Amino acid sequence: MRKAGRHFLQIPGPTNVPDRVLRAIDNPTMDHRSPEFGRLGRRVLEGMQRVFRCAGPVVIFPASGTGAWEAALVNTLSPGDQVLMYETGHFAQLWHKMALRLGVEPTFIEGDWRHGVDAARIEERLRADKSHAIKAVCVVHNETSTGVASRIDRVRQAIDAAGHPALLMVDTISSLASIDYRHDAWGVDVTVGGSQKGLMLPPGLSFNALSTKAIEASKSAKLTRSFWHWEEMIAANQTGYFPYTPATNLLYGLAEAIDMLENEGLDAVFDRHARHGAAARKAVEAWGLEVFCTNEEHYSGSLTAVLMPEGHSADGLRRTIHETFDMSLGNGLSKLADRVFRIGHLGDFNDLMLLGTLSGIEMGLQLRGVPHHKGGVQAALDHLAQTAAKQPEVRAA
Amino acid sequence: MRKAGRHFLQIPGPTNVPDRVLRAIDNPTMDHRSPEFGRLGRRVLEGMQRVFRCAGPVVIFPASGTGAWEAALVNTLSPGDQVLMYETGHFAQLWHKMALRLGVEPTFIEGDWRHGVDAARIEERLRADKSHAIKAVCVVHNETSTGVASRIDRVRQAIDAAGHPALLMVDTISSLASIDYRHDAWGVDVTVGGSQKGLMLPPGLSFNALSTKAIEASKSAKLTRSFWHWEEMIAANQTGYFPYTPATNLLYGLAEAIDMLENEGLDAVFDRHARHGAAARKAVEAWGLEVFCTNEEHYSGSLTAVLMPEGHSADGLRRTIHETFDMSLGNGLSKLADRVFRIGHLGDFNDLMLLGTLSGIEMGLQLRGVPHHKGGVQAALDHLAQTAAKQPEVRAA
Amino acid sequence: MRKAGRHFLQIPGPTNVPDRVLRAIDNPTMDHRSPEFGRLGRRVLEGMQRVFRCAGPVVIFPASGTGAWEAALVNTLSPGDQVLMYETGHFAQLWHKMALRLGVEPTFIEGDWRHGVDAARIEERLRADKSHAIKAVCVVHNETSTGVASRIDRVRQAIDAAGHPALLMVDTISSLASIDYRHDAWGVDVTVGGSQKGLMLPPGLSFNALSTKAIEASKSAKLTRSFWHWEEMIAANQTGYFPYTPATNLLYGLAEAIDMLENEGLDAVFDRHARHGAAARKAVEAWGLEVFCTNEEHYSGSLTAVLMPEGHSADGLRRTIHETFDMSLGNGLSKLADRVFRIGHLGDFNDLMLLGTLSGIEMGLQLRGVPHHKGGVQAALDHLAQTAAKQPEVRAA
Amino acid sequence: MRKAGRHFLQIPGPTNVPDRVLRAIDNPTMDHRSPEFGRLGRRVLEGMQRVFRCAGPVVIFPASGTGAWEAALVNTLSPGDQVLMYETGHFAQLWHKMALRLGVEPTFIEGDWRHGVDAARIEERLRADKSHAIKAVCVVHNETSTGVASRIDRVRQAIDAAGHPALLMVDTISSLASIDYRHDAWGVDVTVGGSQKGLMLPPGLSFNALSTKAIEASKSAKLTRSFWHWEEMIAANQTGYFPYTPATNLLYGLAEAIDMLENEGLDAVFDRHARHGAAARKAVEAWGLEVFCTNEEHYSGSLTAVLMPEGHSADGLRRTIHETFDMSLGNGLSKLADRVFRIGHLGDFNDLMLLGTLSGIEMGLQLRGVPHHKGGVQAALDHLAQTAAKQPEVRAA
């Protein structure tokens, strides 16, 4: 049976794609060798440099985000290379598993998933690596499985403090265009991004932003690669073209999304997400539930994972909410299965959508008989009202 | 500056048009003399009979709703004809003004706008009209300016009780496909409808549903008419065509909207609206504000008008909410200007959208310093949770 | 069974709506009382003044073209007024019939449908009307039923030469934005237009462009009117709003269409249509068939009506072409039924679409065994190649 | 400056995406872990089995076609494996180059690009490979660079005749859903496909159809792989899901495209393409130009490459046509640069679009002064008329 009204897609990505982007995507596909395409290509390539805040090349793959993880590794590393990775959650685990599959030798710094990266532990490992056998440090900026956002600037400081030449590679799939990120200022060598989160696009595009050092490393890297090879991409991109068929229609949407982000202002976008994260946590606190992330400094602006009370099923709650209120929430992944639910509050999102989202959760808690206090929505509402942009009392026509 | 997320269009129409309807509308225009068009024409004409719950013809004008008011009058009346109209609010006034312009002689039963039609007063007037000079009784089912829904069945009973032959003409512009309505069962002669409310379409189509008696009356009616003339419409509609160019692309959307309504079930649609109306009133009560409609039996399922406390500007509140939370609310019309605001909760709408809407109002009240109690959203939320469709505990895959 | 590829919609309107317009139309409906709407309203109202080439007001009705005919008459005339109309074809007949219905007294100058307006005959009638009983002269600029385009400048000269004060009202439904037209320069009082032809929109909007004299006349005109009343329209339009609900989504498309026309340049648009008309006639001549319009000066740039050889059914040809090649052509109307077919070559159209269109006709002639010479497409192709815009031999990258 | 009318995208892919597919693609992105998604996943996976005519699994990558080439190789081969490839043109060269990059050892059977695969030469090589060192035979079904379509059934027979166990891998990127292809009947082990040609989608999806033998081979293959790994794909696909984020919106379009193909009927689709190829060659012959493919049995139904007369630039012709008639044609690749142009006549295409396309070329030849005879369009038109589906003389209403 039809459900009335809009679905609330509140998983931490794919996010609610704005109409303007959808309508851009459904324009007729053009010849990717035409002059018009070259202009589009330059426009999105330059726009993505502003989004990553980098001056070097950004490579755009006609592939979803997992591909960009692979591209980061196969372009910079050789079989048997040591890599330092950090267990912040499920996605850090998956990247680690991929590294193993691709034939490098990752060391995985264990974590409890409830804190972000402890840069001191990275520094310690790098200082111990006198021979500089470690070729890269790989961290996830915002763990989509837990809502924990690590401090990348500190990771950079740790590497510098250790005087270690390892590359720094960062996954920003669920933070790009949602949480402050600075590829160049933070000395990142490869940043990995995807289209379907803060960029407000459907899945199908992914990104590598590159430093000079990363490009240099790629020249001697020995992992096999062809589709993911940066070299031909960078060469063809000079004039706005691609060495093989790009995902043209998604690029139409990307051009539109960049315009929208810049019209709002990237800093305003980050503030909006941070404010929504704070409001969501106010609700969780008022309900008497527990935010999964235990370190305030690592709270995420793009999603909030919530721990269920013992004996209550997070998936049951999600199912009730999906069926009764037509909202999708994120599930708990691997060891968190059925124990947490995740609220995506990123992308093309506003105060009323957030309060609708939190309302659906509060009603779901009631319907499922999950022990909680009322008033979560009220707490978030009060927070948003108090922090709303001030309006001028008197206005001209 | 761009505002993130979706605009909340919570005026009592035009309503939030669902994506499925928008995408239907943007299909290429077809030849309105082609065989394909004839099939589309029959499909929407028959579908609208089910929506109006009538067996007689429905006329579809390629024009917005005001046109269908005019069509109802010019097809059935002659210059100088007496008509009995009932002042339920601003739109009843406008229809009255139109009748005057068109050269008939309406009597306007005065009302205070806070109650619906008192059928006894109509009966009284008709009983007094021994000569049957009154040719038609015109009432508005759901006053869009006030959120007051009248009992059309009682108007029918009043006419019958008076033994009067007047035609019964009803405006359902903001009730059709939102509030229970039965053209045939209630003995209505002409029902007037529009596309942009419960039918979930953009404005640009309007409707007359006709009884045999209305068609009969049209044969001797003397008001001049051409565009609005039923006769050629009904003839051409037999095979699904129109005597002049129809609004083809809106008809695509209409076919889709009828499918959506019938997939949900018209009765389920009415229940959904009634439940949302009740939840909205819970919020208003909890805020300590006043619902403008003072007669419980006349509460509207499609919108709720709220009276502002003395000394506080409804338009100021609406402006703050529009600027701060990107939501449009309906304004107070004519004598209610700046004194009420109207919450549209009709069309393609669901629980989370309603709670987002009410949240925007509660935050607006805070920001404007309008005296109120907190907890309106909470009250609505509790009502919706308590009345949510029961979910089975155990489900099959 | 599905037909592959795009349908060729080559009736003389509705025309092939460009993707850009369709995508504009499917944007979410907005509040027509919002500040954003006011800006849109001004934009389209001012844009339409440039399209009509007039400085006075343009009224936009949320109704298809037939409504704008009615509006022209009911706003300017009183019951029993004499009007001079000219029989150029089926649509002139329909307008004449409408005038009768509305209670004015039209005189219909008879024509053979194969020539445009003979201005001398109008002058003669006006000179004879010493008492100035004739209140208006009504002519169709481009007869959609015949492909005959009259010289409006000459009609103006005729009225002036007769020293007659009658209003000049012109139907440009199938010429606006296709064939050169100048409301002010030609001293037209009311121009009638529609959305679904040269404006490249779906049907559902129609227009009246007004002179000061027409507005003056409307103040004393006595025909009843309400929906079509100019007065409230013009007042509300000052700030970009409408007195009743406008067809918002079609206005989105109108804004886009005006941009597209102005980007191409109105004069370039007229030249394009004229060139396509010439090419279509080359094809008809080469086939040995007869262009219905017999006066070269009155050839239409927007459509070409073709006379079938005796004993051959135009509708049969159209049906074969529709079924075999998925193209819609215009049929012969009233006395031309089954005797002519009409080729629409207006709107968003280019050389290759025209040659595809003519190819479909030439193949249809072959399949139906209609006597003709081969080479019509070739003749059109040669004409288009010879008149194609010159390309620079050497170009920079 | 705006160009009026529709662009003719007549490169051999991406092809003209039908409106129905574009509108499907622009639906809101859904949760790829939801029950609704599982149903979509099964629907497209099963549909693609019917398109490939295979009973085994089809793997769908959220990546453009080049990726599916890589997937075919890395899933089945080990470093240093010998592979037999066949030089049919530019794309066969690129696949060969990729194989080198990925660390296998391809033998490249040289060809002149104007003939398809000579199966006897493959048989000869395989017979000579007594040790069965060759692990795979890789051929391109339809060379997009030349319009030469090879006989895959003969390659299968050659392998069988040689009694050789090598895998057969076939690129059908520009033939799938355009030219008859049978994965199972022809004993293919891996078929490579892409979305942007006969499937009528934008680029961004690619496919591997697999035999049991291919899956078996993948278990011992040693080339590194992660993103392209079949194993997790096949496992997750059982229930309609994907191991990592799929290109959801393109899958909406794929479901629609499969429906459209099956509604027309795959065999009817192939016949349509073959008939259009024949008509295009009629035009080329009549112009006195040379079809690049010299072997009639290898003519392609999806594109036709045309050799330019000595001293005339194919790119100059293409540029003139693009600028003057807004049509994109395919360029000559690598050794054919500037010497051939390629006419794409595949995808969502019909007779009138083809004749518009050929008209643009004939006009371009005139404008550029390329020596040719007139009458190419006429020849194609006559062919299409003669081979058009017969229409019944008498039809019921």
Image (cartoon, coloured by chain):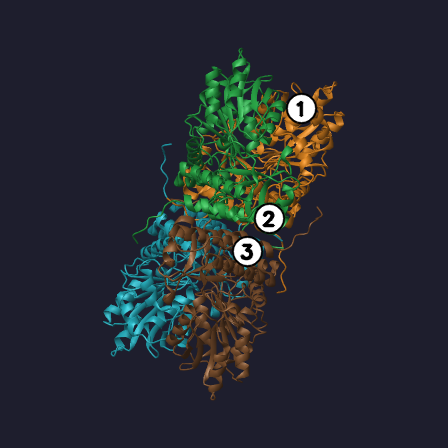
Chain colours: A cyan, B orange, C green, D brown
Assign the N terminus of chain C to one quadrant of the image: bottom right
Among all residues in the image, which is located at the extreme bottom? D131
In this rendering, the answer to whether A146 lies above or below C173 is below
Residue D327 x %, y %? 43, 52
Nearer mark to the viewer, of 2 and 3: 2
Nearer mark to the viewer, of 3 and 1: 1
Circle 2: element type: helix
Nearer mark to the viewer, of 1 and 2: 2
Amino acid at the residue labelled 1: Leu
Instruction: Name the chain letter of the residue that bears numbered label 2.
Output: C
Label 1, on which residue?
A: B77
Give me the C-alpha separation between circle 2 and circle 3.
Answer: 64 Å
Circle 3: element type: helix
Q: Nearer the viewer, residue A182 or C197?
A: C197
Marking on residue C364:
2
Assign the C terminus of chain C to one quadrant of the image: bottom left
Mark 1 Cα shell of 10 Å, populated few (<14), some (14-19), many (≥20): many
Circle 1: element type: loop
Discs 3, 1: same chain: no
Mark 3 Cα shell of 10 Å, populated few (<14), some (14-19), many (≥20): many
Label 3, on which residue?
A: A364
Q: Are marks 2 and 3 in contact (CB under 8 Å)?
A: no
Q: Is residue B123 visible?
A: yes
Q: Are marks 1 and 2 in contact (CB under 8 Å)?
A: no
Give me the C-alpha separation between circle 1 and circle 2.
Answer: 51 Å
Discs 1, 2: same chain: no
Marking on residue A197:
none
Q: Is residue A272 visible?
A: no
Amino acid at the residue labelled 3: Gly
The image quadrant of residue C317 is top right
Residue at image position (45%, 52%) is D362
Q: Nearer the viewer, residue A267 or A393?
A: A267
